[in-house]
Amino acid sequence: MIVLKGLLIGILMALPVGPAGAISTRRALTQGYRACFLSGLGASVSDVIYLMVLEFASPKFRLSITSHWIKAIAGIFIIYVGATLLLPFDPSKGRVNEQENRNDLAVFASTFLMGIANPTILVSLSVLLEAFDVGDLTLPGHSMALLIISVFCGSSILWLVLARGLSNQRVLLLARRVSAILFLSLGLGIVWVALAKMI
């Protein structure tokens, strides 16, 4: 069961939103499948590193991250991300710059470093761990390892699929709309639960 939950968390974390997601989807159109997958993989590895930090953090740190008001703020941010996905998107922007960089390591490192520089991932991961009821710090070591591996596998599997599909602009538009609905729903649900617990 923990593997299934980890896969779902990984899939949700890999949805192409935010700066790293925008770069990855743009590379699908400008550089093709390989560059898109490597970009997505870079973002996924940074997510897993933050997950390991969160899983092995002290209880006090975990409690501060999962407080209700921080969850409410995270929910508002998720709603904002979902709303931005409904805005017009021009994948041709940045075409020249992206074509100049074809080195695999550089493609991977660009989104990896972008993800590492984004500590809000901690809040997003913390909310998802609580939502899927795997945020218990007393989990045995092998269960934590299974969770971390399954989150990475979920992210990687989704990027394998997306890297193929996003090279088509129609699929890209559909993916953005579906992601927008998912994030708006998730954000509203998180804010509702957080406010209900604070009142």
Image (spheres, rainbow, N blue to C red):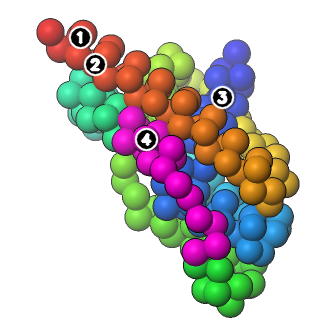
Residue 3: image quadrant is top right
Q: Residue, x 75% and y 43% (percent of image)?
A: 158
Q: Quick one: which residue is furthest to the bottom in this view?
A: 100
Q: x%, y% of residue 61?
A: 28, 37
Quarter of the figure that contains the C terminus: top left
Q: x%, y% of residue 165?
A: 81, 51
- Looking at this view, is 198 or 126 the one in front? 198
Q: Are marks 4 and 2 in contact (CB under 8 Å)?
A: no
* Separation (CA) of disc 4 from disc 2: 20 Å
* Separation (CA) of disc 4 from disc 1: 25 Å
Residue 149: image quadrant is top right
Q: Residue, x 63% and y 66% (percent of image)?
A: 91
> Which mark is on residue 194?
2
Quickly name the residue at label 4: 83
Q: Earlier in the sequence, mark 4 or mark 1?
A: 4
- Looking at this view, is 76 or 110 the one in front? 76
Q: x%, y% of residue 64?
A: 24, 33
| Residue 85 located within the stretch drawn in magenta | yes
